[in-house]
Amino acid sequence: MVFVASNEGRSQLWVRPLDLVAAQPLAGTDGASYPFWSPDSASVGFFADGKLKRVDIAGGAPQVLANAAAGRGGTWNRDGIILFAPTPTGPLLKVSATDGDPVAVTRLQAGQEGHRFPQFLTDGRHFIYFVSGAPGQGIYGGSLDGGSSKGLANADAAAVVSPSGFLLFLRQTALFAQAFDFKRLELSGNPFPVAEQAAFDVLTFAPGFSATSGIVAYRSGPGGVGRQLTWLDRSGKSVGTIGAIDNAGLTSVEPSPDGKRIAVYRTVNGNQDVWLIDTSRGVPTRFTFDAASDRLPVWSPDGSRFVFNSNRRGVFNLFWKSSSGAGADELLLESDQNKVTTDWSPDGRFLLFRSLDPQTGYDLLVLPISGDKKPFPFLKTFFDERDGQFSPDGKWVAYQSNESGRFEIYVQPFPGPGRKFQISSNGGAQPRWNKNGKEIFYVSLDSKMMAASAKLTADGQSLETGTPAALFPVRIADGPVSVANNKQQYAVSSDGQLFLVNLAVDEGAASPITLILNWRPKP
């Protein structure tokens, strides 16, 4: 069995033979997500560093197979073809397990957000996959030979197939199985329960269960990891919390300029919406109500409104709304690429947003708020640039990029051109500025809150940076480089002495893995 686990802040793949009591980590898989087996069980495919990779169980360095900015599952057939989802909001691609260029296999239909978590059937040509986005969210069947897809079942997360002829799927938290004809892609009979409660990720729809011949494995416990907005001082000591532990996938931490409200997004009854949390009472109030996904809010500098992204028109476009709740949601920017705002310039003139280009991955672009509102690129390369943050004076942007092979933190003049400066020295993500403009914070890849000094030279054209220092270890929600690509999971107080962190709580212990042996129901 292969699974993702964290040890001392380090997330990687672990393998456990079922006839042994101990699991062993797989070297070279730091930051891995969504592992899947090769047909001969000698190798594992996974996603890390914005790439699809494979690694041999016997050892050796991982091999990069393709770009996958935010991978959402893969599957491997006996012909050496890997079918995978490179992003949450696109079709499934296929690529050789050795090399080659990825080719699209599925096509998104109207209203569909993305295709995720495929699994080959026994013939190695047909497969099932999860379609996110209402209406029609659920399990579908497809073929490498082309043709139209086929809806199979409504479900709240991705499904798996058992070689014995069953489709296993979730409705709410109950795990069901139903007889499945692999050749006809048809279900028969009635679904029957397998487990009363099986976990799944409410943000990505990843299943917390798997099946093979005679064995079903599932994670019990609540869906996903609980989150708690927690104030930490510079030593990592908790000095207070906001609200209760949240099991609705609370994501993103964006305080209003006056500090009285926190904008987040949560997933309730399968629907993602922007919520505002009152910092004095800790009470969350729903702020968007569309049936589509409304996510990742960013406040204007004066606190009068915020921007969020929504797929109510197909791809994720940018919308904005008055923070008072008055008036309707307004479309701000529409294009054929998914995008999300990462920051708003201090003078209120520019929005910095990341856009997902099929050729170049994540890029950072700028949207002027006035005039023709025509976006222009700030950073557009063949690497992933993400989560840009304006300096307090608006003259610099801190961001993360994987141009070195892993994510590091850089600073570059805005709007450019100019020399860029590397801030982190051993990997980093989720940059934030100290409000005094003299310090940059970020999360290291081994989950520590880091701080580095930043000082303008006398001519104002260059930046002097100090050696980054670790402040404290932090169990930040979704990890340093979120597989959900969910922006910063913390904010910094105005004096730079406190951090409001979206902490992962009860991680691991709340979701043990249960095995059902000799599982052989008759179709």
Image (cartoon, rainbow, N blue to C red):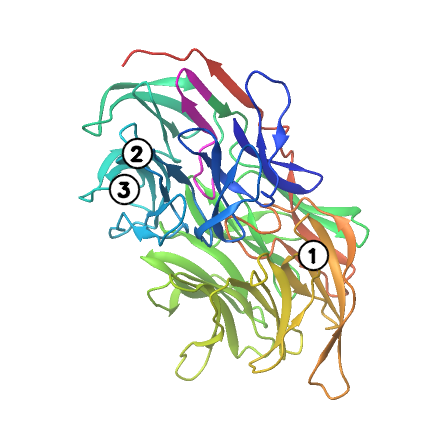
The residue pinned by badge 3 equals 136
Residue segment shown in magenta: 202-216
Q: Residue at x 58, y 79 (%)?
A: 414
| Mark 3 crowdedness (10 Å alpha carbons): few <14, some 14-19, many ≥20 | some
CA gap, disc 3 to disc 1? 44 Å
Nearer the camera: disc 2 or disc 1: 1
Secondary structure, mark 3, is: loop
Name the amino acid, label 3.
Gly
CA gap, disc 3 to disc 2? 8 Å
- Residue 83 pos. (x, y %): 35, 42
| Mark 2 crowdedness (10 Å alpha carbons): few <14, some 14-19, many ≥20 | some
Name the amino acid, label 2.
Asn
Q: Is 110 a magenta residue?
A: no
Q: Is 206 a magenta residue?
A: yes
Which quarter shows the C terminus? top left
- Residue 36 pos. (x, y %): 45, 35
Mark closest to the chain's N terminus, 3 or 2:
3
Q: Residue at x 35, y 68 (%)?
A: 334
Disc tally is 3
Name the amino acid, label 1.
Asn
Residue 262: quarter of image: bottom right
Can see residue 255?
Answer: yes
Q: Residue furthest bottom?
A: 459
Q: Residue at x 70, y 81 (%)?
A: 462
The residue pinned by badge 2 equals 154
